[in-house]
Amino acid sequence: MKFKSIFLFFNMTFLLFLLILILLPSMMLGPDFPGRYWWLNWPLIILLGGILSAFNVFYAVNHRLFTLLEKENWPALVRYLEDRVIHKNRYSSRMLRLLVNSYLVLSDSAAVMSLENRVAIAKPALIDANALIFGTARILGKDISGAVRFFKTRKETVKPGLKEWVRWYHGFALLLDHRFQGAAEEFSLLARLSKDAVITGLSSYFLDQNIARTLGEGEQACREISSMGRERVLAALPARKTWDRETSRLSAEIHAAALSKYMEETGQWLYKTP
């Protein structure tokens, strides 16, 4: 649905609700009731009117942004966001994420890393808050050793909700850098202990399919941990459709969208489906 359609629908619905709230007492309860009704409920009506006004102001201020998003005009959107974020020095998390995602849609990983350097000076806390998309940009830009360093330094500094994914990406970057022992250590820990079924599944899959055969004497232990991780996933998500549902929830995240192929392969490996 278009942003303009959503805006109009919300306005019409909200206005209808306000009209019912204002007129219904007079229509249903007689002409003497509205005075008492207004006296008791005028703060609520004013509050609702304020919410509607704030929504309309927000839409008006961001009209250009919504228009570019509707048209999927990524180059123009990047220019618009660069003006708001970089030139006007407004490093909000929402706008920063949108700018980074727009760069990645255009496959401009170098621009993401340049932006990262600016943010590190202007508002360094935003780097940790958005570690997944900044780190993923390094992987997509083939800066694998840079991705290893980036994720390693942030494994313990990011918020708890991001730690497991940052640790998983550190293992993935190590795997891409052919540092199999380090990747095995990260994935083994996650396969055994992660509370996220998708992270557990991905870790177990890579241990079995990509890492075990490179470890020599450690191959058997690696496969045992992988099997343990697979059993943990199947206990939490017993059917293939439940795995697909969990991975589809991540599809809107740019860092996870880059893993769609591996999520599909992991689903086939977990549930032994073609």
Image: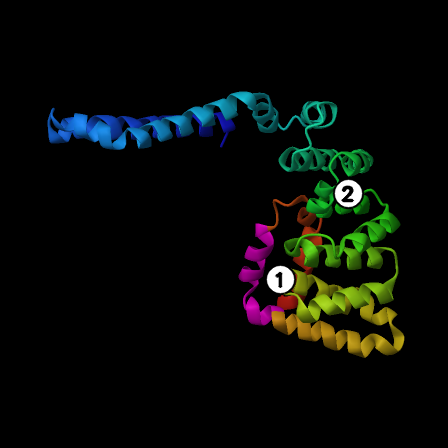
Horizontal placement of 233 versus 147: left or right?
left
Where residue 66 is drawn, which disc sits there? none
Q: Residue visible at 86% across and 48% down? A: 146
Q: CA distance from mark 1 to mark 2?
A: 23 Å
Colour basis: rainbow
Q: Residue visible at 61% across and 63% down? A: 197
Q: Quadrant of residue 196?
A: bottom right
- The segment highlighted magenta reads 233-249
Counting residues from the start of the chain, the first of labels 1 and 2 encountered is 2
Q: Are marks 1 and 2 in contact (CB under 8 Å)?
A: no
Under tag 2, what secondary structure?
helix
Q: Amino acid at mark 2?
A: Ala
Vertically, is 63 above or below 251? above
**What residue would you read off at disc 1?**
196
Residue lying furthest front: 39
Evaluate whether residue 209 shows in this view.
Answer: no
Under tag 1, what secondary structure?
loop
* Percent coordinates x, y for residue 18 in the rendering: 30, 28
Residue 235 lies within the magenta run = yes
**What residue would you read off at disc 2?**
137
Residue 69 lies within the magenta run = no
Vertically, is 256 above or below 242? above
* Percent coordinates x, y for residue 171 in the rendering: 79, 59
| Screen quadrant of the C terminus | bottom right
Q: Quadrant of residue 193?
A: bottom right
Q: Amino acid at mark 1?
A: Asp
Number of other residues with Cα within 10 Å of mark 2, as a class: few under 14, some 14 to 19, many 20 or more: many
Vertically, is 14 above or below 168? above
